Image (cartoon, helix red, strand yellow):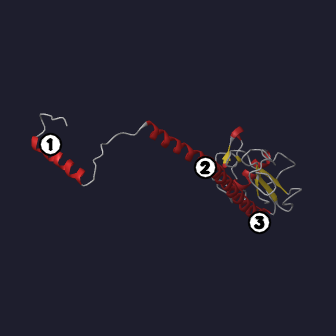
């Protein structure tokens, strides 16, 4: 034990006596030391393993949340379309167009909101009714035309009086996480990841 001049001799004797009493009782004073490199590496490996387990599942949870949000948007659009049909006895017109993601989506937007300018302003149809009040996350105005979009930013498809699925009403669909129609194996009973109103 090194004696420093600033330390009191009485303190040293007391500390030495305490140390001796602890040794007599079988208690050994342990000196504090830092972590070894091996201990730090073991902790880092454990953290890396935990991240490897949890990060992939976080992506799956995020994807499910985006699918749920898109399903909610489609349900909201379906309710608005049903209300529109009650008032007008038809759905927003198609005028022979088959551009499901472009022109038909735009007509759906204008028909339900009455917003011809695409500025998300609160307007109404000719009867003074606005069937839906979209927020910015539901609408994209790329190219100057407002369109309803899914959680991935892709335009929704809209087709009134279709030849398949909902033949007496309309089809609304999202191309899903992969952005392509009729592909993907993550969602749905038929191997497609598309989100729509007929399943």
- Drawn side of residue 103 relative to residue 140, left or right: right
Please determine whether, in this image, residue 22 is positioned above or below residue 87: above
Q: SS of the residue at dot 2? A: helix
- Quarter of the image for the C terminus: give it: bottom right
Q: SS of the residue at dot 3? A: helix
Which residue has dot 2 on it?
58
**Which residue is depicted at the point 70% across and 53% down?**
114
- Drawn side of residue 163 relative to residue 55, left or right: right
| Relative depth, front residue between 179 and 49 | 49
Mark 2, Cα crowd under 10 Å, few <14 / some 14-19 / many 20+, is few
Which is closer to the viewer, label 2 or label 3?
2
> From mark 2 to mark 1, how far is it between C-alphas?
58 Å
- Drawn side of residue 15 relative to residue 38, left or right: left
- Of mark 2 and mark 1, the one earlier in the sequence is 1
- Quarter of the image for the N terminus: give it: top left
Residue 32: % across, % down: 31, 42
- Residue 127, visible in the rendered structure: no
- Of mark 2 and mark 3, the one earlier in the sequence is 2
Q: Residue furthest bottom?
A: 86
- Residue 20, visible in the rendered structure: yes
Residue 12 badge: 1
Q: SS of the residue at dot 1? A: helix
- Of mark 3 and mark 1, the one earlier in the sequence is 1
Which residue has dot 3 on it?
86
**Which residue is depicted at the point 76% across and 48% down?**
175
Q: Residue furthest right?
A: 163
Residue 144: % across, % down: 70, 39
> From mark 2 to mark 3, how far is it between C-alphas?
42 Å
**Which residue is depicted at the point 73% across and 46% down?**
155
Mark 3, Cα crowd under 10 Å, few <14 / some 14-19 / many 20+, is few
> From mark 3 to mark 1, how far is it between C-alphas?
95 Å
Residue 172: % across, % down: 77, 54
């Amino acid at each position: 034990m090194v004696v420093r001049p600033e330390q009191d001799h009485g303190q040293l004797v007391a500390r030495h006596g305490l140390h001796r009493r602890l040794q007599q009782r079988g208690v050994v004073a342990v000196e504090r030391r830092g972590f070894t490199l091996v201990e730090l590496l073991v902790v880092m490996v454990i953290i890396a393993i935990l991240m490897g387990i949890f990060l992939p599942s976080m992506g799956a949870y995020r994807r499910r949340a985006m699918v749920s949000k898109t399903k909610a948007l489609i349900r909201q659009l379906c309710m608005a379309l049903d209300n529109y049909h009650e008032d007008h006895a038809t759905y927003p017109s198609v005028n022979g167009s088959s551009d499901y993601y472009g022109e038909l989506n735009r007509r759906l937007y204008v028909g339900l909101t009455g917003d011809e300018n695409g500025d998300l302003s609160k307007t109404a149809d000719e009867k003074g009714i606005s069937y839906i009040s979209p927020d910015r996350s539901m609408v994209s105005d790329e190219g100057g035309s407002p369109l309803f979009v899914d959680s991935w930013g892709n335009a929704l498809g809209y087709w009134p009086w279709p030849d398949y699925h909902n033949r007496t009403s309309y089809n609304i669909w999202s191309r899903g996480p992969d952005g392509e129609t009729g592909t993907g194996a993550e969602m749905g009973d038929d191997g497609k990841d598309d989100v729509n109103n007929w399943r």
